[in-house]
Image (tube, rainbow, N blue to C red):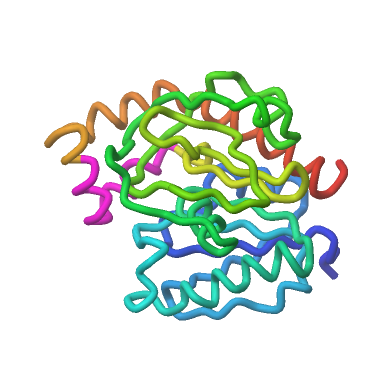
């Protein structure tokens, strides 16, 4: 029987936006991971059966509830997980934005999209946050987003920032961490994401037609460092959430 204390629930919005390298870490540590594909009509199970919640990225925006009605129940589940059950929460990209929206913040279209390998700066709170301890500052990461958090929920602190996107990471100093950027990527990520029309359009508009080849090379050249960052982030989260 699976140890209930090592059960992780992952909410996905697109099959190819999965936990990536984090799945290797989950498996190595014996976590049981249930993935719910919200875009395929799967429903969110009872959160009380899990001890951690991860919410991944996706091409939709938090305000598109008419087009994606399941966004309402997802935001409700995020609020319930954090406010009612104090379940450790990790949000990545869309998951980061959904956290803010669910807890009373606001998300808007970015003035300037971020696409590519770039750096974010840790804030004073970020340098002290348990999830980010030991990570370099500035922090190298992979970006591919056109929306950003423009109002911060009162109970969360900004942990990282960039010029184009001031809210790159949020946390409550305990059980909640969310990041706008990506460190979960693998060798296949760029190719897989470029197959999504919305992502392709964003990349071509931001970096220019034909830039996909250069982006792949840049990611491959930095992949080992990105995976090492992911490993440290994961170890910090595991210690904070599970004590080992």
Q: Is residue 184 visible?
A: yes
Which quadrant holds the N terminus? bottom right
Residue closer to the observer: 177 or 164: 164
Residue 20 or 84: which is nearer the viewer? 84
The percent position of residue 81, horizontal first and vertical second, equals: 70, 66
Residue 64 appears left or right of 106: left
- Most distant residue in the left direction: 209
Q: Is residue 135 left or right of residue 100?
A: right
Vertical placement of residue 187 versus 53, above or below: above
In the image, which residues are magenta?
187-203
- Return the x and y of residue 105 as percentages of the image width and height: 52, 56
**Residue 36 drawn above or below residue 181:** below
Whether 125 is drawn above or below 99: the answer is above
What is the tally of numbered marks visible in this picture?
A: 0
Residue 52 position by quadrant: bottom right
190 falls in the magenta region: yes
Residue 137 placed where, x, y %?
58, 19
| Residue depicted at 21% across the width and 36% down the height | 206
Residue under the image location 74 percent in, 42 percent down: 173
Viewport quadrant of the C terminus: top right
Q: Position of residue 4 (x, y in %)?
A: 84, 66
Magenta: main secondary structure equals helix
Locate residue 44: give its quadrant. Answer: bottom right
């Amino acid at each position: 029987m699976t140890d209930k204390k090592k059960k992780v629930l992952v909410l996905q919005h697109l099959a190819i936006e999965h936990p990536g390298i984090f799945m290797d870490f989950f498996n190595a540590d014996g976590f049981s991971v249930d993935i719910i594909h919200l875009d395929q009509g799967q429903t969110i199970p009872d959160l009380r059966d899990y001890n951690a919640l991860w919410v991944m990225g996706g091409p939709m925006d938090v305000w598109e509830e008419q087009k994606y009605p399941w966004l309402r129940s997802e935001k409700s589940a995020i609020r319930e997980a954090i406010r009612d059950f104090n379940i450790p929460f990790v949000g990545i990209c869309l998951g980061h934005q959904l956290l803010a929206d669910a807890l009373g913040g606001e998300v808007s279209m970015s003035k300037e999209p971020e696409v590519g390998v770039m750096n974010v700066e840790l804030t004073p709170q970020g340098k002290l946050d348990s999830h980010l301890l030991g990570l370099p500052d500035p922090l190298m990461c992979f970006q591919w987003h056109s929306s950003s958090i423009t109002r911060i929920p009162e109970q969360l602190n900004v942990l990282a920032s960039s010029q184009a996107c001031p809210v790159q990471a949020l946390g409550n100093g305990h059980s909640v961490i969310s990041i706008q950027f990506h460190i979960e990527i693998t060798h296949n990520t760029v190719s897989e994401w470029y197959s999504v029309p919305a992502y392709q359009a964003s990349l071509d508009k931001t970096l220019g037609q034909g830039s996909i080849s250069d982006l792949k090379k840049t990611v491959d050249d930095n992949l080992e460092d990105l995976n090492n960052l992911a490993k440290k982030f994961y170890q910090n989260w595991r210690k904070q959430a599970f004590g080992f």
